[in-house]
Image (cartoon, helix red, strand yellow):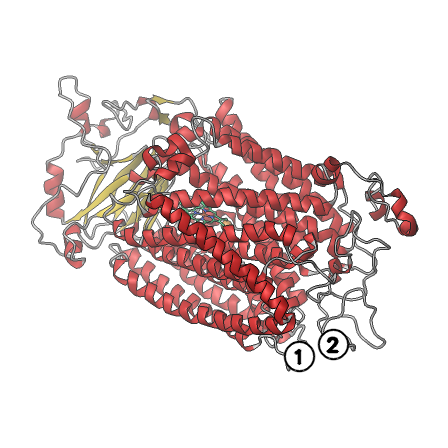
């Protein structure tokens, strides 16, 4: 679809270039429902994603508080938990079954609902049209569907928390046979069916969104916006979408087979099982097959979570250092490298499943190869801020935190990717520490950087800076205090997904540090609430923007009015003349040259 | 009551912080945006610096705290190699960690915004980019080389003199089967499993089964210095035989048999003395989520001298004798979950 055709059905938008001068007449009010609920405006959809994502983030984080209480204080009771969880925490103590239900939901919610839908959904929607110069997505209708499928999926997941047998409880990876057999665990009952249905809808949502993002980027760029003039955010969101579109269907197929095994007596994943006092008829299936299908998405998934953060951090670091991103092309090439390799490393999650050692060797090689493009990115970020003129705004602080956490978490990946070391560290707290730092907290930092940076664009107001700084320090220091010690516990062999360690001679002496971690986790949780309050209060009471380009940034989104309507630019879409990182003297005392500024005579384009 | 109090306290702190936030923004407006932004920038740069320094001190403190809580020296041959490789990786990643984190925070401090500075327009440099593509690539090559060497050693075929023991997981305990005098494990079939008298579904028509010995308490006896090959299986869902003292781990998957071999080098008794812990015991932890009792799926390994092992073995009765012969009384099964320490109390003279 062309840029103008995209909006043709939308009565609110008549900002067509030809009608710009008398558009007031045609601007008849849309009904509230079509404007804010079933909206097809990418900016509104982006807000829907971020607010749904935030609700999920609070739920997911609250769950971690509950199970952290259990881990820190296995012998105490917390009557307040009974208020929240009812029978699942009788007398204020979490039951083992519900502990497992909680960690499963926590993982699923944060990985998929917050850091996939919430992150990509928000920023791909907000930034792609604004930064490539399009009036909306290629298909605004599909875009709307993408949100509503996510919404349905959310509802099903929420419902699964309230069924009597509890939510799915086999871990967010839900390996069969545990997840396939109702006899194996209470959570493998209705809760698991709801989980699978919800995730299936989630895949649909993610595909609808992803295809739209790709098509929009490829087809709807404004005049002059060549691929190599796109901001790195758009590049990153493009590869995020590519990863999702190619790998989610594989996950989907894995789920379909699991649904069949659960309900229709097939034996894709089941073989030679004796459970609940009887031998099951299944023969010849392979439990490992599921793991291949799952991790074929599962690994790209971690990059689906990381890439948007990388893109946004690149943009933020450059803008607030008043310097171009260092090595623009190297950044794109490393994104391509990461995307390709992301499909070739999935079995590093399966080194100890009994797979062929030779195959394991190949996966070691490919896995450690990913460290190369990742290292390039880190060094390029460092060089970007080197000799800059760094404005430590909240988005910049979070972007710096992002780099710090990405380094810390990335380096521990070298331990886990090397099968000979993974053979001891696999499924210990070392893994918990690794993936929380690199994809949990680091991706969150990328997201926070993005929120603080683009909040003025979304709502026409600023967020409160001081609260932003407090939020930064609590989260940054807290994250390290929580997850750094976990590495040591993992090196000592402490397994993950344990409800209680006190009966283990080898692990019981970590009780003290577990208390410490739990207390910090509680504080960090309240620190996040501060962010939530800041976010919502600022929507209504934040300081208003007085200029459309508050950060002095080059990219196109800052050429729209402070509160752009559907269609983004009131007049014609601006034409682009240069790359987005020309942070240099423009000859008029400014230290930046927006993309819409024509090249000066004699000036070479990047 | 204390719950209410702490809630009130939390809310209070929260409100105060929020008010500080609002107030400081108002103050900024009054004092003049530009001026206060400059001050804030300076203060934040210093705070980042302090965070970094405290971070480094924190790492050191954390290290000291954990120093004596980590695993003792590895109790298997391959584990020694593991520990060496681990140290190499720690050094390589540690160097990168300290360099990059220092640069990050140093640049943040050094290049904080100031009126007298203009940012240096530096968009790319082929040499630099080539440098930091090749150096990590070379470092990776080294790590991969060490890794693969160890990996292929650990996963190599067990030596022919290795003892063979079967380890089978079920919700939520480990069943260990020894081949008995004939040194051969008999056939088994999951359809023959009966929790009362045939926990592994052994096929009684196979004579090799007649002398097999089963420990339902998950006690794995091994001879020090003698290689052992574990045949690993599962009756129901996926479990994982985690042997952290030996730096090893292998999934137990229903429907397939996985294997893992190693040579234990330190007896349990020696380890008690080494760690100054009379309660020391090698534990088998289940390392794959397997249901609500996952965290309690514990087995033990008892590494002992050949004499001790033989003595223990002599005291064991074949499972067949106890369960399959009609006249024989059924042996009371030992407690399945969380057995306490090893029951083995042989005098502690060992060699290793
Ligand atoms: C305050 C922040 C957080 C805390 C204290 C926390 C704590 C934990 C802990 C202790 C576990 C392991 C439980 C166990 O194995 O028994 C866990 C699991 C997990 N967490 Fe978090 N977490 C936090 C935030 C996040 C974030 C931001 C993500 C997003 C990626 C995340 C994703 C996961 C996943 C995927 C699992 C694995 C669940 C499973 O084992 O199936 N967490 N979390
Ligand atoms: Cu992976
Ligand atoms: Cu288990």
- Residue A78, position as x, y percentages in the image: 34, 40
Q: Residue A415: x percent and y percent?
A: 42, 58
In contact (CB < 8 Å): disc 1 and disc 2:
yes
The mark tally for this picture is 2
Q: Is residue A372 visible?
A: no
Tell me the chain of label 2. A
* Mark carried by residue B118: 1
Callouts 1 and 2 on one subunit: no
| Rendered image quadrant of residue A587 | bottom right
Which residue is more in the foreground, A351 or A203?
A203
The numbered dot on residue B281 is none
**How many neighbours does mark 2 have within 10 angstroms: few (below 14), some (14-19), or many (20 or more)?**
some
Q: Nearer the viewer, residue B221 or B186?
A: B221
SS state under label 2: loop
Q: Secondary structure at mark 1?
A: loop
Residue A481: image location, x then y, percent: 40, 59
Mark sitting on residue A585: 2
Q: Nearer the viewer, residue A520 or B165?
A: A520
* The C terminus of chain A sits in image quarter: bottom right
Residue placed at 43% from the left, 66% from the top?
B93
């Amino acid at each position: 679809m062309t840029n103008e055709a995209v909006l043709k059905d939308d009565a609110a938008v008549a900002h067509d270039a030809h009608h710009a001068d008398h558009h007031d007449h045609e601007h008849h009010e849309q009904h509230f429902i079509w404007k804010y609920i079933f909206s097809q405006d990418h900016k509104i959809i982006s807000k829907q994603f971020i607010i749904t994502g935030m609700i999920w983030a609070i739920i997911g984080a609250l769950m971690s508080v509950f199970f952290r209480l259990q881990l820190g204080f296995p012998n105490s009771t917390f009557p307040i938990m009974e208020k929240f969880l009812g029978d699942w925490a009788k007398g204020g103590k979490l039951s083992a079954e519900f502990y497992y239900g909680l960690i499963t939901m926590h993982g699923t919610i944060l990985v998929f609902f917050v850091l996939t839908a919430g992150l990509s959904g928000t920023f791909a929607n907000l930034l792609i049209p604004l930064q490539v110069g399009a009036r909306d997505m290629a298909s605004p209708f599909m875009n709307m569907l993408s949100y509503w499928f996510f919404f349905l999926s959310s509802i099903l997941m929420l419902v699964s928390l309230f069924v009597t047998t509890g939510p799915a409880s086999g871990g967010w990876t839900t390996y069969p046979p545990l997840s396939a057999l109702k006899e194996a665990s209470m959570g493998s009952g209705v809760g698991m069916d709801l989980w699978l249905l919800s995730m299936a809808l989630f895949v649909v949502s993610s595909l609808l969104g992803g295809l739209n993002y790709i098509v929009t980027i490829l087809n709807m760029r404004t005049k002059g916006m060549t691929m190599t003039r796109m901001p790195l955010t758009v590049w990153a969101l493009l590869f995020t979408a590519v990863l999702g579109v190619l790998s989610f269907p594989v996950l989907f197929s894995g789920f379909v087979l699991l649904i069949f095994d659960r309900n229709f007596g097939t034996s894709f994943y089941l073989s030679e099982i004796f459970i609940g006092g009887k031998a099951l008829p299944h023969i010849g299936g392979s439990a490992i097959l599921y793991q291949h299908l799952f991790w074929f998405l599962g690994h790209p998934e971690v990059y689906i979570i990381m890439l948007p953060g990388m893109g946004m951090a690149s943009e933020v670091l450059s803008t607030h250092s008043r310097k171009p991103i260092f090595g623009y092309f190297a950044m794109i090439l490393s994104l391509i490298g990461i995307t390709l390799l992301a499909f070739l490393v999935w079995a590093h999650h399966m080194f100890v499943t009994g797979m062929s050692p030779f195959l394991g060797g190949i996966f070691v090689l490919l896995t450690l190869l990913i460290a190369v493009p990742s290292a390039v990115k880190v060094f390029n970020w460092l060089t970007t801020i080197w000799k800059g003129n760094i404005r430590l705004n909240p988005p910049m602080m979070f972007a710096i935190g992002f780099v710090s956490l990405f380094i810390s978490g990335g380096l521990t990946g070298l331990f886990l990717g090397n099968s000979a070391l993974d053979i001891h560290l696999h499924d210990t707290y070392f893994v918990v520490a690794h993936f929380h730092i690199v994809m949990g907290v680091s991706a969150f930092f990328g997201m926070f950087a993005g929120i603080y940076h683009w909040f003025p664009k979304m709502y026409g107001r600023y967020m409160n800076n001081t609260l932003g700084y407090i939020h930064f320090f609590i989260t940054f220091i807290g994250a390290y205090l929580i997850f750094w010690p976990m590495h040591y516990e993992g090196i000592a062999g402490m397994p993950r997904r344990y409800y209680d360690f006190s009966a283990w001679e080898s692990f019981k002496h970590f009780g003290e540090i577990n208390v410490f971690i739990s207390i910090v986790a509680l504080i960090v949780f309240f620190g996040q609430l501060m962010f939530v309050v800041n976010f919502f209060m600022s929507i209504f009471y934040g300081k208003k923007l007085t200029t459309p380009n508050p950060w002095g940034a080059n990219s196109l989104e800052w050429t729209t009015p402070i509160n752009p309507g559907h269609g983004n630019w009131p007049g014609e879409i601006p034409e682009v003349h240069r790359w987005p990182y020309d942070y240099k003297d423009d000859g008029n005392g400014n230290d930046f040259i927006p993309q819409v500024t024509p090249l000066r005579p004699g000036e070479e384009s990047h | 009551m204390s719950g209410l109090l702490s809630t009130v306290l939390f809310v209070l702190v929260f409100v105060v912080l929020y008010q500080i936030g609002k107030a400081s923004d108002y103050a900024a407006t009054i004092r003049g945006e530009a001026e206060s932004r400059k001050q804030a920038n300076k203060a934040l740069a210093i705070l980042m610096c302090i965070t970094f320094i405290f971070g480094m001190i924190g790492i050191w403190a954390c290290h000291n705290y954990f120093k004596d809580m980590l695993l003792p020296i590895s109790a298997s041959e391959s584990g020694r190699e593991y520990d060496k490789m681990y140290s190499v990786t720690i050094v390589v990643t540690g160097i990168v960690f300290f360099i990059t984190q220092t640069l990050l925070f140093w640049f943040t401090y050094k290049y904080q915004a100031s009126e007298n500075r203009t940012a240096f327009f530096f968009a790319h440099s082929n040499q630099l980019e080539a440098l930091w593509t090749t150096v990590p690539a070379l470092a990776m090559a080294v790590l991969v080389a060490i890794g693969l060497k160890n990996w292929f050693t650990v996963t190599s075929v067990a030596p022919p003199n290795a003892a063979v023991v079967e380890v089978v997981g079920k919700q939520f305990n480990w069943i260990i089967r020894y081949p008995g005098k004939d040194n051969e494990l008999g056939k088994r079939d999951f359809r023959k499993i009966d929790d009362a008298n045939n926990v592994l579904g052994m096929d009684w028509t196979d004579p090799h089964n007649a002398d097999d010995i089963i420990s339902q308490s998950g006690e794995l006896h091994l001879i020090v210095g003698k290689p052992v090959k574990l045949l690993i299986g599962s009756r129901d869902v996926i479990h994982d035989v985690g042997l952290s003292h030996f730096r090893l781990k292998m999934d137990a998957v229903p429907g397939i048999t996985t294997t893992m071999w190693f040579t234990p080098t330190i007896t349990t008794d020696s380890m008690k003395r080494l760690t100054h812990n009379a309660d020391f015991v090698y534990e088998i932890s289940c390392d794959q989520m397997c249901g609500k009792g996952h965290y309690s799926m514990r087995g033990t390994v008892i590494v002992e001298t050949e004499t001790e092992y033989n003595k223990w073995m002599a005291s064991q009765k074949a499972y067949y004798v106890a369960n399959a012969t009609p006249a024989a009384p059924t042996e009371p099964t030992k407690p399945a979950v969380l057995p306490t320490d090893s029951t083995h109390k042989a005098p502690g003279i060992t060699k290793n």
